[in-house]
């Protein structure tokens, strides 16, 4: 490809990324009426909120849609065993320091260019620098060797026991290196919002606030897939409207229990949908957490954070907000990770009098006030509960709702926030999903869902880094218990509950959650009965 052709292609991508919304308005909680030129079988998916990008290469808030277009080296079955995708063979040396991948031949990018080992090399090295989780996961990779177009060899300084599992489509989607000019800002690259991939679906359009369209890739390397002709994603921020959309059949599928928990029994009783917990082995239920910006003068005082902690009743949150569909957790490692999760008691039991005393000790006997950032109806309800709970100790909370893109910019870009109500993925290993929150080397301005609190503790860093290098499971568990005890004591953040996740789908839909990635996978095998 010549330089002039590449610029032309990039200009097209930039135009798509900057295109204004043209669809109808989303008002009154109604689903936008959008006319689609439909041919063949169409599956309509739903998300409560609109992510700022469609590719999870450097933006982990975008993993919900990324794998339709962009593929990883491997897929994983429900038991987390690797299976071929863009890599057909792989080998790990006995010392764990060399990984060799044989790549699938004859694969084309959606723009017609050949997929090669150079694309894998560029992806891994760039992801190591800018991906909030892969900064730690890929930390030991010292060299990526490409002896030919279909061989990739990774050389590590030290073993990383969980490395192979990071090569899924949602965690490490391979991107076309020919679209990225040297020195470009990958965080704002047009391919993030109008992606070119090798996957079973081709990106067609994104009308902001309304929908995204993907069409079947008729030149896909596996001629038997995909089994539907079009995917439509619709954004429905109103919680009640989401329930109605499932009842009426306007929506075929949504994941992470996308309706209010109070509506679950009602929707189950209709008999028109199925519920399943399958498809969450790779990305298990998130920890719902409040993060504190330790750069803020008030929140830099541990006594203020301890006062907040003494106001949080997790059992009550589960009952009132989550209708007993969640699991309380004062630890950032979710109970799903049974061995790694620290089940010891919360060091700050509910004690309003103690909270008031701590505020007085910190020089604020009359109380303090904060803003709390959040996204969506579900987080608003939890925010209202927390606001009422903290007010008992004289801690006033102003809730500030916004779309996901604005929140990411404010919290991780400008770092201009006080409290942030978040849903954070642990993924398949706490080293991947949790380390990023507390490792000082993950304090990176502009990288979403990294160490946004600014927490720094040399002892915690040492434990995290030792656990990352260990191949002894018992040793890793002990180190992670140390990490949890310390961060629970220091309270840079306030873990609340592990949410309960189910995928809801119309009964006519089949094979949407055939592996560990579930909804966050390609959906290439999904079909309509």
Image (cartoon, grey):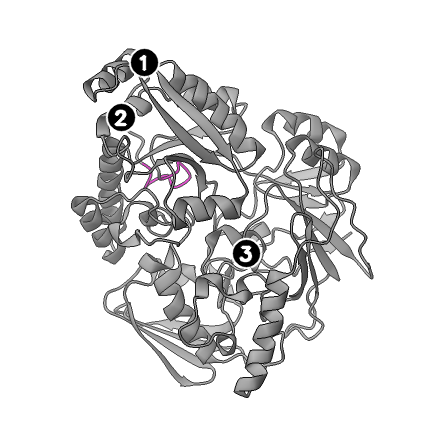
Q: Which mark is residue 53?
A: 3
On the image, the x and y values in percent for residue 320 come to 51, 19
Q: CA distance from mark 2 to mark 1?
A: 13 Å
- The region drawn magenta spans 333-341
Q: Quadrant of residue 492?
A: top left
Label 3 environment density (alpha carbons within 10 Å; few <14, some 14–19, many ≥20): many
- N-terminal label among 3 and 2: 3
On the image, the x and y values in percent for residue 293 come to 32, 38
Secondary element under disc 3, as helix, strand or loop, is loop
- N-terminal label among 3 and 1: 3
Return the residue at label 1. Answer: 352
Quadrant for the N terminus, please.
Answer: bottom right
In depth, the one of 465 and 47 nearer the eye is 47
Return the residue at label 2. Answer: 304
Q: CA distance from mark 3 to mark 1?
A: 42 Å
For residue 424, above or below residue 100: above
Q: Quadrant of residue 48?
A: top right
Viewer-nearest of labels 2 and 1? 2
Prevailing secondary structure class for the magenta stretch in the rendered image: loop
Label 1 environment density (alpha carbons within 10 Å; few <14, some 14–19, many ≥20): many
On the image, the x and y values in percent for residue 284 come to 47, 44
Secondary element under disc 2, as helix, strand or loop, is helix
Secondary element under disc 1, as helix, strand or loop, is helix
Horizontally, is 72 left or right of 107 in the view?
left
């Amino acid at each position: 490809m010549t330089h002039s052709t590449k610029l032309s292609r990039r200009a097209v991508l930039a135009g798509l990324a900057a295109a204004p919304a043209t669809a109808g308005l989303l008002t009154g909680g109604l689903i936008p009426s959008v006319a689609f030129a439909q041919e063949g079988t169409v599956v309509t998916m739903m998300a409560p909120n609109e992510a700022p990008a469609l590719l999870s290469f450097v933006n982990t808030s975008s993993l919900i849609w990324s794998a339709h277009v962009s593929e990883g080296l491997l897929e994983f079955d429900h038991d987390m065993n690797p299976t071929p995708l863009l890599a057909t063979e792989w080998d790990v040396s006995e010392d764990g320091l060399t990984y060799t991948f044989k790549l699938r031949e004859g694969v084309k990018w959606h723009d017609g260019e050949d997929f090669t080992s150079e694309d894998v090399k560029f992806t891994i090295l760039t992801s190591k620098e800018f991906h909030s989780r892969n900064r730690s996961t890929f930390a030991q990779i010292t060299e990526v060797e490409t002896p030919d177009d279909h061989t990739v060899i990774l050389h590590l300084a030290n073993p990383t026991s969980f490395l192979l599992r990071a090569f899924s489509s949602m965690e490490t989607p391979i991107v076309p290196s020919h679209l990225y000019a040297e020195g470009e800002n990958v965080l704002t690259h047009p391919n993030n919002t109008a992606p070119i991939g090798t996957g079973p679906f081709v990106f067609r359009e994104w009308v902001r606030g309304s929908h995204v369209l993907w069409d079947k890739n008729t030149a896909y390397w596996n001629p038997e897939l995909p089994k539907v002709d079009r995917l439509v994603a619709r954004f429905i921020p109103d919680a009640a409207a989401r329930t109605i959309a499932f009842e009426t059949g306007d929506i075929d599928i949504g994941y992470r229990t996308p309706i209010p928990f109070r509506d679950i029994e009602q929707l189950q009783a209709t008999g028109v949908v199925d519920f399943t917990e399958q498809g969450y082995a790779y990305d298990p239920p998130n920890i719902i957490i409040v993060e504190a910006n330790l750069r803020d003068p008030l929140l830099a005082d541990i006594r203020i954070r301890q006062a907040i902690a003494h106001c949080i009743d997790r059992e009550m949150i589960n009952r009132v907000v989550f209708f007993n569909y969640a699991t309380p957790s004062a630890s950032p490692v979710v109970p799903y990770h049974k061995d790694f999760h620290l089940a010891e008691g919360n060091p700050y039991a509910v004690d309003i009098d103690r909270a008031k005393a701590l505020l007085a000790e910190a020089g604020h006997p009359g109380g303090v006030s904060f803003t709390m950032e959040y996204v969506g109806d579900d987080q608003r309800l939890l925010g209202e509960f927390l606001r009422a709970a903290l007010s008992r100790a004289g801690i006033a909370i102003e809730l500030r709702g916004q779309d996901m893109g604005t929140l990411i910019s404010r919290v991780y870009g400008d770092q201009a926030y006080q409290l942030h109500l978040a849903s954070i993925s642990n993924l398949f290993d706490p080293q991947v999903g949790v380390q990023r929150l507390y490792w000082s080397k993950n304090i990176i301005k502009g990288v979403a869902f990294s160490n946004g609190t600014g927490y720094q503790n040399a002892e915690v860093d040492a434990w995290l880094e030792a656990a990352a290098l260990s191949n002894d499971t018992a040793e890793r568990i002990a180190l992670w218990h140390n990490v949890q005890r310390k961060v629970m004591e220091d309270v840079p953040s306030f873990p609340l509950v592990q949410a309960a996740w189910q995928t809801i789908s119309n009964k006519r839909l089949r094979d949407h959650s055939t592996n560990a990635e579930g909804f966050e996978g390609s959906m290439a095998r999904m079909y309509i009965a």
